Amino acid sequence: MDQTKDTLRHIRTKRLNRKWCSIPTTMGGMKKSRRLVQWLFVLMLYGTIYPVAHSQDSLFHSQEVIWKERQAQVQHWKRVQDTFSTTVDSVKKRLFFERGARDTTALDSTLIFLIEKKKGISKFIYDIKTARTTWLLTPEPTPVEGDSLVLEELLETDSVENKNKDLVDTLSHLINGYERLIGDVIYLERWLGNQRAEVAINDVDTSTVKKDDPVRRHIVRAVQTNLGKDGSTSGFFDFPAWSNRLFLILVSLFYFYWMYKLGRKAEQDDEEFRLYQNEPLWIPFLKASIFFLTLLPFASLSVPVLILESSYFLVFVFLYILLYKELSAFKRKVLGLIFISYIILIVANLFLSAPWWTKVFAILANVIGMVVVWSIGRRTDVDNPIGYIHLYARWVIILGHFLAIVLNIMGYVSFARMWSLAAGIGLLQVIALRAVCEMLLHDIEQQYERAKPEAMLRRFDLKRMLLSFERLFRFCSAALIVLVLLNNFHLVREASSLLERLLMTEHKIGGIAFAYGNLMLAGAVIWLANWFQKNLKNLLDDSSPKNELQVRKVTLFPLFRLLIIVIGFLIGISILGLGIDKLTVIIGALSVGIGLGLQNVINNFVSGIILVFEKPFKIGDYVELADKKGQVMEIGIRSSTLLTDEGARVIIPNGDLLSGRLVNWTFRDADIRVNMTLTVDNTIRVEEVKQELEVKLASFEEIDRSIPMKIFTKEITVDSYQLSIQVGIKHVRYIERFRSRFLESFKEDMDARGVKVSSG
């Protein structure tokens, strides 16, 4: 039995020893298993992330390849456009500056060359339009969803998409450039075709003898050729070209209606110029016609010279009809000479060609034009809208006539004709622009004077408004003069291409790309937002007070002004093409300097926002801060303005208003009380003085009778007693006036009774 127990004990001990000896081996296996699980987790995580990252890389790479291919294609089209433009410019210069007659062989070869170029340009226009349609309809690849690890790749993909959109926008500019180019080619084709017919007729006239008059036939062909040089008017009146002109017609009709309504309100003065009147009905009609014809070049940048000649001639006739009665005898003669000289100049340039007698006729016409311009330059009838021409404009017009004479003598007929027409049209244009500017400024002044006092227009200062409009009209006049000159010299396409290159060419500063056109547009948007926020109160609120105590509450205007500035700034940044990521980097780089150098400005700025929402005071409240006391006239983002009792305007930073001890005497229509102390001799009873004070105080109009009046005995001495008075006042501004009047009146009453009184 004992032996059996020993055997069992031995077996149990052996098993226990085996178990403890196997523990290290088991722990080592567990470590290996844990490492295996970790590696499996890493492989699973890599297998999950790798397809996403790989898809993002593939997406970005494919978009980058597409963008590079499209960019190369656009650059190719630009180079081809530059080549075509250089070729057409060389043909145009050769035709303008060539002296003497041209042979049929040279004209035919040039015509064939231009026809081939026109076909090539048309093909490129078709290809670019097709590419733009295809690029717009191509669906954008959608990015595969992933986590924050692929954020950088997503941003890069977004930047490539923006580049593709910029390329599509560039195609529109290319199409416009090619269309202007093909317009020049068509113009040169018609010009050369007319010259080819003229040369053929001259060859027939010289080789055969006919009964027909060769001079008459030559004049007819010269007129046809010169009309062809002035540009075809048929395309100008086509229906597709009337989109902008219809808008100008609507604006002119609105101006006619404005003048008609203004004429019904105004009292006509017999001493006033007819140009400034609006009755009878034919006067507004002529003024609206002058307005339309003067601004016609803005509606269509490329205007035939014949249209310019006719439109400004009609403007001159309409102005002469309106101002005939007000003109002096001398000015009537001068304007009559302008009329005759202009007709002679137009006819001479229609007949101008190779024969010597047409050149002599054109030279005489230019000499007459110089004499007339010198005559109208005298400073007589300065107040008349067409009284005289400015000195600089006069000399420029005379220079144009002089160059036309010199070029005619040298044999450059086409170029001389351009200078002659530019001088003639320029004379009428200068007269018309000055008259229209005076007319519009006087109409605005009339509208201001006829407007009701509560009208929005009356909230602006008249002198500043007229000065701003005068600057705007001068800028528009300068643009019109340049545009008419470019049309006279047939340089609209070249000027637009040069302007497009200057404004739309990208420049880089570091990693930021910008164009001068976008920079100017962004500046204009920010300037407009700044002007709008400055004049927001005039545009939306009647700033004139209803009485001397109350001004309309516009407390939220500072916040609106801030929003306008922020929105304008963000729009300007988006126009420049700066992304939010780049803007964040710039702001982060400048934040340290801004935080250290502009602490007070930022403090006042934040305080202004807090004041807008917290509203411890509003416009019209009477407040007191330290030694400054006055009525709140304006609450701005950075500072606020107080009007003191002395009439001075005190500008206080918003940080001081928020952190200082501010006393608002009119906060939520609070009761305003005045405390005074009077010392009276014992020669009169206390009750008698109190009754007299109650009657006296109630007689003042500044007293607010809704507030109980209080009169107490404060101290009593052997010789006198002291009374404490508290009364309500209607407004804080009345305190000093009431105190002065009351003390003077009470002193007179007490002196009459022989009682000494003093105030404390």
Image (cartoon, helix red, strand yellow):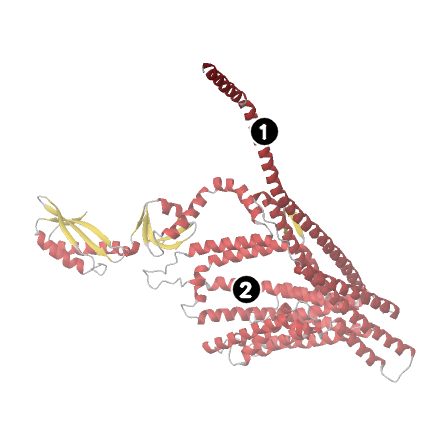
Numbered label attached to residue 32: 1
Image: 308 above or below 648: below
Q: Is residue 592 visible?
A: yes
Q: Is residue 267 visible?
A: no
Give 501 or 418, whichever is nearer the viewer. Answer: 501
Left or right of 13, for residue 684: left
Give 597 or 648, whichever is nearer the viewer. Answer: 597
**Which residue is at a point 23% across and 59% down the rendered structure image?**
702
Badge 2 element: helix
Residue 723 x, y percent position in the rendering: 14, 49
The quarter holding residue 320 reads bottom right
Left or right of 479, for residue 670: left
Give 404 or 42, whichever is nearer the viewer. Answer: 42
Residue 365 x, y percent position in the rendering: 73, 73
**Which residue is at a point 50% across and 42% down the rendered structure image?**
594
Left or right of 152, for residue 211: right
Three-letter amino acid code at the position of disc 2: Glu
Image: 584 above or below 618: above
**Which residue is at a point 51% across and 74% down the rendered structure image?**
258
Residue 565 x, y percent position in the rendering: 49, 54
Image: 509 above or below 399: above
Left or right of 757, for residue 618: right
Numbered label attached to residue 470: 2
Badge 1 element: helix
